[in-house]
Structures are given as C-alpha cells and as structure tokens.
Amino acid sequence: MGDTIKVGIGVMIIKDNRILLGHRIAGGKDTGGIFEPDSWCLPGGKQEYDETIFECAKREVKEETNLDVWNLEVFSAVDDIQPHKHFVTIQMITKDYTGHLEIMEPEKQDEWKWFSLERLPEKIYSPSKKFIDAYLAKNKDTDKLQSGDE
C-alpha cells in the first residue's frame, strides 16, 4: 500500500439494544486492509473512487450481509495505522435496515451475529473496537443505545 492513505467505512447497525458483528475467518487472506483474521468486526470496507461515503457504507453492508441500510449518521473519523497501511475510517451508525441477514462473502466472514454491548466477543477487529469503545464512552450514561440523534 506504500504511502497512500485509504478511506475505510465501518457501520454500526443497532437493533433492540444490540449491534451486528461478523466473524472474520481464521484462514482469511490479506485483501489490502487492516489484516486481523479470526476476529469479530462491524460491516464495512474500502471506499471506491467516485463513491460517496454513504454509497460506500450501503454497498459494503449489502455486499457483506445482504441488508439494505439507510438514515446513516456519521459518528466520527479515526486513523487506523499499521506498518505500510494507513486508513482513515469513517464510522457510521444506523438503526434502519431491511433484508434477510446472510453470509455473502464466505471467504471473508463465516458468521454474522447480534451482540449486546454488555456481552461482546473477546477478539474484536481493531478498527471496530476503536469505534465500539468510542461509542460506549460517548453513551456511557444512557440506558439505551443512541443513534447519534441526541
């Protein structure tokens, strides 16, 4: 990847006080992103040229989960830096989706599951963990998950 900064998108889909996470397969291939196999992640991926961040979020969620999302809200933007890789990750939140949840990319994820923020899996993909931790810090005094419309 060299000296190029890429844009990544992570989407937190909220349902009944839970969030959707996908399990990245243990034997996964490095596709040029932040490579952390055998971890749980939010849906998302790399932005393509001539695509808005919202189009990217919708496309990535559909490609990975078969869900259609809308009313996306930008939560924050963070740097995700590893040796020879630098991403700026746009973090988005939504409660609005339709569709039947499916494993659309079995070569990347082998499971999608809804998790309570009080009972998250132990091994979380680092960009997703940054997002979840920031979200928890912002919403630590609320009883219910917020979608940013405070």
Image (tube, rainbow, N blue to C red):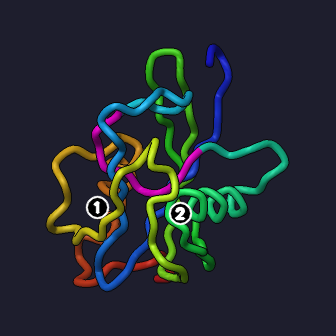
Q: Residue 115, position in %: x, y?
A: 25, 68
Q: Specify the label residue 92 is tagged with.
A: 2
Residue 103 percent across, percent down from the top left: 44, 60
**Residues packed near mark 2 inside 10 Å, few (<14), some (14 to 19) or many (20 plus):** many
Badge nearest the viewer, 1 or 2: 2
Of residues 106 and 121, the one nearer the viewer is 106
Drawn side of residue 93 relative to residue 117, left or right: right
Q: In the rendered structure, does residue 53 fall within the stretch colored magenta?
A: no
Q: Secondary structure at mark 1?
A: helix
Residue 129 visible in the picture: yes
The front one of 143 and 21 is: 21
Residue drawn at (28%, 64%) of the image:
136
Looking at the image, is mark 1 or mark 2 earlier in the sequence? 2
Please give the count of numbered marks on the rendered protein.
2
For the residue pair 132 and 63, the one nearer the viewer reads as 63
- Secondary structure under badge 2? strand
User: Which is nearer the eye, 108 or 87?
Assistant: 108
How far apart are the alpha carbons under marks 1 and 2? 16 Å
How many other residues sit within 10 Å of disc 1, few (<14), some (14-19) or many (≥20)? few
Q: Amino acid at mark 1?
A: Ala
In the picture as drawn, the residue positioned furthest to the front comes out as 106
Describe residue 59's horizontal placement relative to residue 93 as left or right: right
Residue extent of the magenta highlight? 37-45
The percent position of residue 26, horizontal first and vertical second, equals 30, 35
Residue type at mark 2: give it: Met
When asked about the image quadrant of residue 19, the answer is bottom left
**Which residue is at 66% across, 60% downward?**
59
Is label 1 in contact with label 2 (beta carbons under 8 Å)?
no
Residue holding disc 1: 137
Residue visible at 37% across and 81% down in the picture: 15
User: In the rendered image of this protein, does residue 129 appear above or below residue 111?
Assistant: above
Say above or below: 50 vs 117.
above
